[in-house]
Amino acid sequence: MPSFTSIVFAIAAALSVATSSPLAARDICGAPPTGTAAQTPLAEPADITTAALCLAQCQAHTGCECFLFGFVNNVYTCELFSVPASAIPPAIDLVAYDIDCSNVPTVVPTASNPTGVNQKRQNIVSGATHDNPQNGIPAAGQAPLTTPNNIGSLDACLAACRGNPACIAYTFISGVCNLYA
């Protein structure tokens, strides 16, 4: 009969093998990459404004295993790679996604949210005037002046702000336009 110690060692060995297998590796989803070797992108599609659109490009590109996405120097960046996200070295204002990630953001990144990942932080703006309305809120926690109905886009929300003499700032989040004084 096997000893207690040999059974413990057998279980530990089995767990060690199971946790080191590729199946146990976790996908990187919306986190800065941590690899150490430089990688060359398979492609760098242009005019991709959300991580979800970058994912669609990766899924359509043969050999794509992951992508980097973000808003760098006021330019949307989508880079497709033939290696897992864990192999990509860190990049400023870019986050990595393996191709199997779910819940990839559909948020268009901004200078204050360059990866599109931070969807809950309020965009506080300064220097907003009626002649130069800003996309954001003038102060943290400020209640909207009004929430106009039937506004279907960011551009329409801006137009509504320009049409209200008290409006200096606006937000359009999840289909809701808010105007601020």
Image (spheres, rainbow, N blue to C red):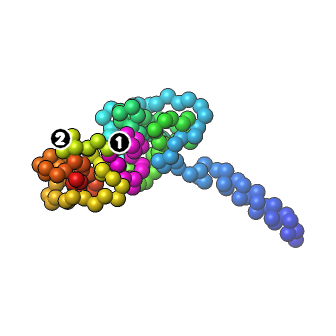
* The disc label shown at residue 161, or none: none
Instruction: Look at the picture and state if 155 lies above or below 38.
Output: below
> At 39% across and 55% down in the image, what residue appears?
120
Question: What SS does tag 2 mark?
Answer: loop
Q: Identify which residue is drawn at 56% across, 51% down.
A: 26
Magenta part, dominant SS: loop
State which quarter of the image contains the N terminus: bottom right
Q: Quadrant of residue 49?
A: top left
In the picture, measured across the screen, residue 6 lies left or right of residue 66, that is right
Magenta region: which residues?
A: 110-125
Residue 102 can be seen in this image: yes
Residue 110 is tagged as 1
Is residue 106 visible in the rendered structure shown here? no
- The percent coordinates of residue 125 (x first, y second) are 32, 46
Residue, disc 2: 131
Name the amino acid, label 1: Thr
The residue most toward the left is 163
Judged from the image, the secondary structure of the residue bearing numbered disc 1 is loop
State the residue at coordinates (45%, 51%): 101
Q: What is the x, y in percent for residue 109?
A: 36, 43
C-alpha separation, residue under disc 2 versus residue under disc 1 = 22 Å
Which numbered mark, 2 or 1, is in the foreground of this view?
2
x then y, percent, for residue 12: 76, 60
